[in-house]
Amino acid sequence: MPVAGIIRKDITVPPEVKVEKSGDEIIVSGPKGDLRRQFIHPKLQIEVKGDKVSVYCEFPRKEEKALVGTWAAHINNMIKGVTEGFEYHMKLVYSHFPVKISVKGDTFVIENFLGEKKPRTAKILDGVKVNIDKDIVKISSIDKEKAGQTAANIERATKIKGYDIRVFQDGIYIIKKG
């Protein structure tokens, strides 16, 4: 029975995953790797006991109620990341000029976009793998935020300025998240 004045979200940890708390930092270890994240707030608490992780707050205000759910979602995403991982699929679309895409170190390079002489680039964050298969770009990582940010960096690098976007629909677009 819930206690009045306390909001709590419980997360069940699968047997192949290990969750530890070290000060304000949560460390999630699993078959695909380890993730670390700091959770700092004066009123919110995280408790790790066996196969359960609890995020709770006593006498929360509106913002703290929302934050309890947000922190629980972040921990769930960390658990999902170390067990399954996250993958984004993007599609290269062009009609005016043939575009060449490649990966050079931690940079995604887009050449001949709209016939431009200078290549456009996008940053690939640490821990993210980018695979190119013809016109499909696959981005995978155990960290959901890094995978999503890398996909956003690539999509933003092909943003068209100064042209009618109804005619010039060239670019690299997210077609699948998962």
Image (cartoon, grey):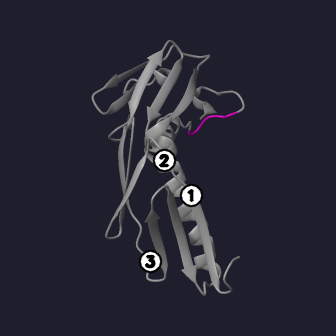
Frontmost residue, 150 versus 119: 150
Image height of 124 relative to 90, above or below: below
Look at label 2 and name its amino acid. Answer: Ile
Frontmost residue, 34 versus 152: 34
Q: Are marks 2 and 1 in contact (CB under 8 Å)?
A: yes
Q: Which of marks 2 and 1 is in front?
A: 1
Query: Residue 110 at what x, y percent from top left?
Result: 42, 25
Q: How crowded is mark 1: few (under 14 residues within 10 Å), some or many (20 or more)?
A: some
In the picture as drawn, the residue positioned furthest to the left comes out as 105
Q: Is the magenta stretch mostly helix, strand or loop?
A: loop
- CA separation in Å, label 2 and label 1: 10 Å
The span shown in magenta is 161-165
> Sequence-wise, which precedes: disc 2 or disc 1?
1
Query: Residue 26 at what x, y percent from top left?
Result: 38, 60
Assign a secondary structure to mark 3. Answer: loop
Tell me the tag on residue 79: 2
What is the total number of numbered labels drawn onto the structure image?
3
- CA separation in Å, label 2 and label 3: 21 Å
Tell me the tag on residue 41: 3
Frontmost residue, 1 versus 134: 1
Task: Identify the image quadrant of the N terminus.
Answer: bottom right
Q: Nearer the viewer, mark 2 or mark 3?
A: 2
